[in-house]
Image (cartoon, rainbow, N blue to C red):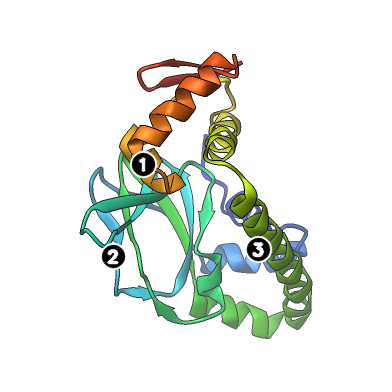
Amino acid sequence: MAHDPIKCVEQVPIFRGAPKNVIEALARVSVHQKKIPTGQMIYSSGEPNDRLMIVDSGRVRVFSYADDNHERTLYMLHSSDVDLTGALFSSHEHHNFAQAIEPTEICYLKQSAFKDVLKSYPEMALSLVDILGERLTLLEQRDVTDTLLTSKERLYNYLLELQGQFNSPTYKLPVTKRELALYLGITPETLSRQLKLLVKENKIKVDRREFTIL
């Protein structure tokens, strides 16, 4: 299916509901479908973080290095995922790394181009204040909730999120179990125990890296 620059921009949460002329202006100044081969870095720690990124197709792994110098997967980006929204509003450096783990196409909107559009459409700036306020409130609530969840609950919530991303109750885990443990902030041994509990509770089925939500 042909890439639609308008739909690409419309899927960015902070732009949903924006007037058509604003979306069209943002689509014109965005870069669409930049091809990234498997294994290539999209950005690295220390580089300028000055653009919003949309994964048009493929998968991207965002990771950092722990104190023991081991890689830690922070999260995965899949088709239609949006990342680095904050880069549109403030200038700073990347603290993490992003790498394509399969042939990937990304679209991006640079902060400078975004601000030029806002100057032409000041009503959009006022709308963004309300949208960002709502998002900050939701993030604060989510941080509190995550702090109170047990490791098993965090694991199960993550597996449910993957079910939604793949739009299927059965899917292949996009990261290794070791990377998943690092992402959840638990040891591989704890991850193994919690997976066995979820299987015992008849919530999931596991066949190596194939998971099924029951």
Q: In screen coordinates, is 167 left or right of 43?
A: right
**Disc 3 to disc 2, C-alpha distance:** 30 Å
Q: Check disc 1 and report the residue beneath it.
A: 187
Closer to the chain start, of discs 1 and 2, is 2
Mark 1 or 2: the one toward you: 1
Closer to the chain start, of discs 3 and 1, is 3
Mark 3 or 1: the one toward you: 1
Circle 2 — which element? Answer: loop
Q: Position of residue 97 (x, y in %)?
A: 31, 60
The image quadrant of residue 159 is top right
Residue shown at 46% from the left, 69% from the top: 51
**Disc 3 to disc 1, C-alpha distance:** 47 Å
Circle 3 — which element? Answer: helix
The image quadrant of residue 31 is bottom left
Q: Check disc 2 and report the residue beneath it.
A: 44
Query: Mark 3 is on which residue type?
Result: Glu
Q: Is residue 79 above or below residue 40?
A: above
* Dot 1 alpha-carbon crowd within 10 angstroms: few under 14, some 14 to 19, many 20 or more: some
Q: Check disc 3 and report the residue beneath it.
A: 24
Circle 1 — which element? Answer: loop
Query: Mark 1 is on which residue type?
Result: Thr
Query: Mark 2 is on which residue type?
Result: Ser
- The reply to whether discs 3 and 2 touch (Cβ–Cβ < 8 Å) is no
Mark 3 or 2: the one toward you: 2
Q: Position of residue 101 (x, y in %)?
A: 30, 42
Q: Position of residue 153 (x, y in %)?
A: 59, 37
Q: Is residue 114 above or below residue 20?
A: below
Q: Is residue 51 above or below residue 34?
A: below
